[in-house]
Image (spheres, rainbow, N blue to C red):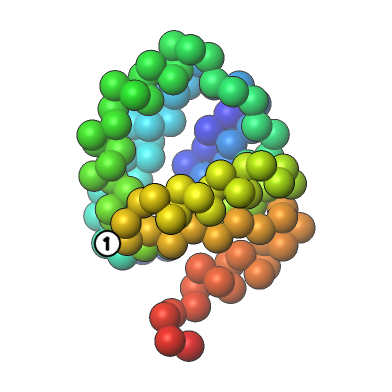
Amino acid sequence: MFKVTANGKNRIDIELSGKLDSDEMRTALDDLVDKSDNIENGIMLYDVIDFHMPSLSAIAIEFSRLPEMFGLIRKFSKAAVLSDKTWIKKVSELEGVLIPGLEIKAFSREQRDEAEAWLEATEGS
Protein backbone atom coordinates (compact mmCIF):
# COMPACT_ATOMS: atom_id res chain seq x y z
CA MET A 1 0.00 0.00 0.00
CA PHE A 2 1.19 3.48 -0.92
CA LYS A 3 -1.38 5.99 0.31
CA VAL A 4 -1.03 9.70 -0.49
CA THR A 5 -3.10 12.22 1.46
CA ALA A 6 -3.18 15.98 1.02
CA ASN A 7 -3.00 17.47 4.51
CA GLY A 8 -3.51 21.21 4.18
CA LYS A 9 -2.33 23.64 1.52
CA ASN A 10 1.36 22.63 1.35
CA ARG A 11 1.58 19.25 3.02
CA ILE A 12 1.44 15.69 1.75
CA ASP A 13 1.31 12.62 3.98
CA ILE A 14 2.42 9.27 2.60
CA GLU A 15 1.91 5.85 4.17
CA LEU A 16 3.93 2.93 2.84
CA SER A 17 3.22 -0.63 3.86
CA GLY A 18 3.87 -3.94 2.17
CA LYS A 19 5.24 -4.68 -1.29
CA LEU A 20 4.25 -2.63 -4.33
CA ASP A 21 3.71 -4.11 -7.77
CA SER A 22 3.86 -2.11 -11.02
CA ASP A 23 0.15 -1.20 -11.04
CA GLU A 24 0.27 0.02 -7.44
CA MET A 25 3.45 2.00 -8.13
CA ARG A 26 1.94 3.66 -11.21
CA THR A 27 -1.24 4.58 -9.28
CA ALA A 28 0.75 5.84 -6.28
CA LEU A 29 3.03 8.04 -8.37
CA ASP A 30 0.06 9.42 -10.32
CA ASP A 31 -1.66 10.24 -7.02
CA LEU A 32 1.48 11.85 -5.62
CA VAL A 33 1.93 14.03 -8.71
CA ASP A 34 -1.75 15.01 -8.70
CA LYS A 35 -1.87 15.92 -5.01
CA SER A 36 1.42 17.86 -5.23
CA ASP A 37 0.35 19.92 -8.24
CA ASN A 38 -0.15 23.29 -6.50
CA ILE A 39 2.39 22.86 -3.71
CA GLU A 40 5.26 25.32 -3.26
CA ASN A 41 7.83 25.08 -0.44
CA GLY A 42 5.86 22.10 0.83
CA ILE A 43 6.37 19.62 3.62
CA MET A 44 5.94 15.87 3.61
CA LEU A 45 5.35 13.29 6.34
CA TYR A 46 6.40 9.84 5.14
CA ASP A 47 5.26 6.98 7.40
CA VAL A 48 7.04 3.72 6.57
CA ILE A 49 4.85 1.20 8.38
CA ASP A 50 6.13 -2.08 6.96
CA PHE A 51 8.72 -1.81 4.19
CA HIS A 52 9.21 -4.50 1.57
CA MET A 53 11.25 -4.07 -1.58
CA PRO A 54 8.95 -3.27 -4.51
CA SER A 55 8.72 -5.72 -7.36
CA LEU A 56 11.20 -5.30 -10.23
CA SER A 57 8.39 -4.08 -12.47
CA ALA A 58 7.44 -1.44 -9.86
CA ILE A 59 11.05 -0.27 -9.69
CA ALA A 60 11.09 -0.02 -13.50
CA ILE A 61 7.98 2.21 -13.36
CA GLU A 62 9.65 4.44 -10.77
CA PHE A 63 12.87 4.72 -12.82
CA SER A 64 10.92 5.52 -15.97
CA ARG A 65 9.43 8.53 -14.16
CA LEU A 66 12.62 9.84 -12.51
CA PRO A 67 12.68 13.17 -14.40
CA GLU A 68 9.11 13.84 -13.30
CA MET A 69 9.92 12.81 -9.71
CA PHE A 70 12.93 15.16 -9.58
CA GLY A 71 10.65 18.01 -10.63
CA LEU A 72 8.12 17.02 -8.00
CA ILE A 73 10.65 16.82 -5.17
CA ARG A 74 11.63 20.46 -5.81
CA LYS A 75 8.15 21.42 -4.62
CA PHE A 76 9.13 20.34 -1.10
CA SER A 77 11.59 21.86 1.38
CA LYS A 78 11.21 19.44 4.31
CA ALA A 79 10.32 15.80 4.77
CA ALA A 80 9.97 13.84 7.99
CA VAL A 81 10.33 10.08 7.73
CA LEU A 82 8.77 7.85 10.36
CA SER A 83 10.22 4.35 10.61
CA ASP A 84 11.21 1.80 13.21
CA LYS A 85 14.03 0.51 10.97
CA THR A 86 17.39 2.16 11.64
CA TRP A 87 18.64 1.58 8.09
CA ILE A 88 15.57 3.31 6.58
CA LYS A 89 16.14 6.33 8.82
CA LYS A 90 19.83 6.52 7.85
CA VAL A 91 19.14 6.15 4.12
CA SER A 92 16.40 8.80 4.35
CA GLU A 93 18.70 11.32 5.98
CA LEU A 94 21.43 10.53 3.43
CA GLU A 95 18.93 11.33 0.66
CA GLY A 96 18.40 14.70 2.34
CA VAL A 97 22.12 15.39 2.02
CA LEU A 98 22.11 14.39 -1.65
CA ILE A 99 18.96 16.27 -2.74
CA PRO A 100 19.59 20.02 -2.88
CA GLY A 101 16.90 22.14 -1.23
CA LEU A 102 15.26 19.26 0.64
CA GLU A 103 15.88 18.74 4.34
CA ILE A 104 14.99 15.24 5.53
CA LYS A 105 14.90 14.19 9.17
CA ALA A 106 14.07 10.69 10.37
CA PHE A 107 12.07 9.79 13.46
CA SER A 108 10.87 6.60 15.09
CA ARG A 109 7.18 5.91 14.43
CA GLU A 110 6.28 6.69 18.05
CA GLN A 111 7.81 10.17 17.57
CA ARG A 112 5.05 11.33 15.21
CA ASP A 113 4.26 14.42 17.33
CA GLU A 114 7.93 15.48 17.29
CA ALA A 115 8.12 14.89 13.52
CA GLU A 116 5.03 17.02 12.91
CA ALA A 117 6.37 19.80 15.16
CA TRP A 118 9.68 19.74 13.25
CA LEU A 119 7.85 19.93 9.92
CA GLU A 120 5.76 22.89 11.02
CA ALA A 121 8.68 24.81 12.57
CA THR A 122 9.94 27.62 10.39
CA GLU A 123 13.62 28.27 9.88
CA GLY A 124 15.19 30.49 12.51
CA SER A 125 12.59 29.71 15.17
Is residue 83 found left or right of 70 in the rendered image? right
Is residue 56 found left or right of 53 in the rendered image? left
Residue 103, given in percent of the width and then of the height, sits at 43, 62
Q: Residue furthest top?
A: 57
Q: Nearer the viewer, residue 110 or 100?
A: 100
| One can see residue 5 in this view | no
Q: Residue at x 55, y 60 (%)?
A: 105
| Residue receiving disc 1 | 40
Please say if 24 is above or below 15.
above
Q: The residue tagged with tag 1: helix, strand or loop?
A: loop
Task: State which quadrant residue 32 falls in.
Answer: top left
| One can see residue 72 in this view | yes
Q: Residue at x 65, y 32 (%)?
A: 51
Residue 94, given in percent of the width and then of the height, sits at 50, 50
Residue 28, given in percent of the width and then of the height, sits at 43, 30
Amino acid type at circle 1 is: Glu
Q: Residue at x 72, y 55 (%)?
A: 108
Please say if 15 is above or below 66.
below
Q: Residue at x 43, y 55 (%)?
A: 97
Q: Residue furthest bottom?
A: 125
Is residue 13 found left or right of 89 in the rendered image? left
Please say if 67 is above or below 13.
above
Q: Nearer the viewer, residue 22 or 105?
A: 105
Tell me the quadrant of the picture where the N terminus can be found.
top right
Number of numbered discs overlaid on the protein picture: 1
Residue 71, given in percent of the width and then of the height, sits at 24, 44
Is disc 1 surrounded by few (<14), some (14 to 19) or many (20+) residues within 10 Å? some
